[in-house]
Image (cartoon, grey):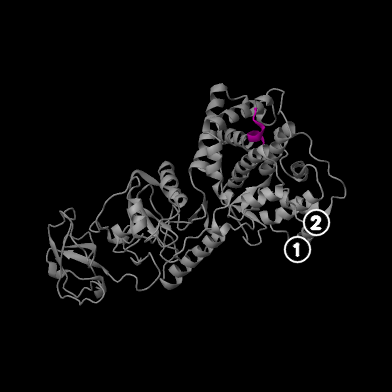
Amino acid sequence: MHCSAAAVLLLLAVLSARTQAALLPHHISSLIPILQSLEVDDTPDIPSLVRALGGCGTPVCHTLLGDPTPTPKPIPELWKLLAHLLHPNATAAEHGLALAPDGSTVALAPLFAGIEVGLKRAAGWPGPIDQPYAALDPLYAVTITEALGTSFLMAQVNGTAALGPDGCWDDVDNPQSFTLLGPPSLVPDAVANGAMDGVLLGTRLAEEPIPLSILFRRYYGVENGITSGWPHSSRRRRDFGALTAVGKLEEEVVAMLRVLRGLSPTREIMEEFGEEEEADIAHRAAREFMEVYVECPAIIPRCMWGARPYRGTPRPLSPPLGSIYIHHTFVPSAPCRSFAACARDMRSMQLFHQDTRGWDDIGYSFVVGSDGYLYQGRGWHWVGAHTRGHNTKGYGVGYVGNFSASLPDPEAIALVRDGLIPCAVRAGWLHQNYTLHGHRQMVNTSCPGDALFQEIQTWHGFKSWSLAHQDTNPTNVDHVDPRLCGQQPNEYQTRWTLVHIDLNPMNSRSEDQKDPSPRGPQSNEFQTRRIPSTWTPTQGWQTRTLVFRTPVWTSPGSLPVAQQTVPVASNIP
């Protein structure tokens, strides 16, 4: 249902007022009132107008879709606003992008090209009839396969990246400038997002045409209560994978490469490749695209959630690592269900970890929202502060919320279990024979909550492991408080202590004594071990006894003991 013309004019007046003080924000919410006004004006072919103003202008788009709508001179003011969103800087590789409410960035050219195909099909368009274009599925050709085939072709010749990278906006509230996070390819993440959206929305419109302003509101969750559930755009990877099998995408890339043999500048390059090499390029292109953008979850980079700088110098990890440690944040206690809420929680946790606990950065490697996305903490490359004594050995993944009595949403569980972990193995960040643990198995804590801990015991790689398995390398001792899960200062009271083990147990001393010259682990006399003062032995863990010569606190309300014996694992030398 269309809004009244007065309502549309009011929306445009608001946008116009913003452009007087600053440029129109490159946001989907800026695009919708423009579409709405064009619809009220009965603009006949909005996607074709988009092509005329800076949308898809490739030879394949032009051949398949025909000439775009002529542009009058002078260009109407409303068209200027649309042109600004589509092509603000003709020299920038990152032009024509818009930030969606779910935190993803979408390239508008493939998005509107897919929509144009869908509307044409709804009107009875049979598609191309001339060879070699007749072999193409136009919906995939104008959205993804031309860019994908060309990108992998160029990568084969030049050794450049064929996919990615992601990027960041200068200001998520008023996005104006977008910067890529690495060397560009012809299919950066924004183009992949726009292409998948173009396929999904084009398919939807071919079945049932509706006004584009309504379609965009529903799909991107603009003013439709996204805080109570995921917008459809956050499910684009799942939905595209359900619609498009890898074999279908490979067939379309093969057909596109045959078209590219007759187009410049790819004609000269394709002369170097035979049919087998062409098939191999298509296979790799389809397989890698589906792995990266369908099978693996999207990760919101630090710059998009507003991370502060890391304090000090981060320590590099040495992947592949052997473990994944699952946490819940406890505080924030409620799952975050929108990009705005999750970004706010990320900033809050980083603030607490840096300013209250004195850590260098947010402790987790990655954080899981209930909005369909993962959020980068310290990431794949840097040692985290999530699981004391094990931070160099694995990645810490924290679910936003308190999952003592309830579980995260099934989609949030699948993001890690079926997405992040297998993708980390495939990418070489994690060993194939990795082990998965709950935080409570490594540190005396209730984290990740009873409900979530019970759930992860069903996951591949889960290992029942006792607290007795402690990291015996003292260089891995860091400032991490074992009470990472939860921000309440009295949530856990059990202490951990570092002891220096000698053949003479009376030489043991705790870290609390601040020994000015402890002998290191290379000494035959001293060995450094870290154990919890409440350590309970499990089956088979007793070959020698440590004796604490100084008081060691156990639990709330108990008295310090002058001497306490603790069984130690037999595999500790």
- Let me know if residue 275 is in the magenta part: no
Q: Earlier in the sequence, mark 2 or mark 1?
A: 2
468 w.r.t. 266: above or below: below
For the question of whether residue 7 can be seen, the reply is: yes
Residue at 54% over, 60% down: 305
Where residue 138 sits in the image (x, y, percent)?
A: 67, 32
Q: Amino acid at mark 2?
A: Ala
Q: Is 103 left or right of 521, judged from the image as shown? A: right
- Quick one: which residue is furthest to the front in this view? 1
Which residue is identified by label 2? 5
**Residue type at numbered disc 1:** Val
Which quadrant is the C terminus positioned in?
bottom left
As drawn, 22 above or below 35:
below
Residue 439 rendering spot, x and y as whole percentages: 33, 58
User: Which residue matches tag 1?
Assistant: 14
Q: Measured from the top left, where is residue 115 in percent x and y? A: 69, 41
Using residue 454 as the reference point, say whether residue 46 is left or right of it: right
Residue 446's spot in the image, x, y percent? 32, 63
Q: CA distance from mark 2 to mark 1?
A: 14 Å
Residue at image location 62% in from the left, 44% down from the top: 197
Q: Which residues are magenta?
A: 136-142
Q: Nearer the viewer, residue 269 or 346?
A: 346
Question: Which mark is drawn over residue 132?
Answer: none
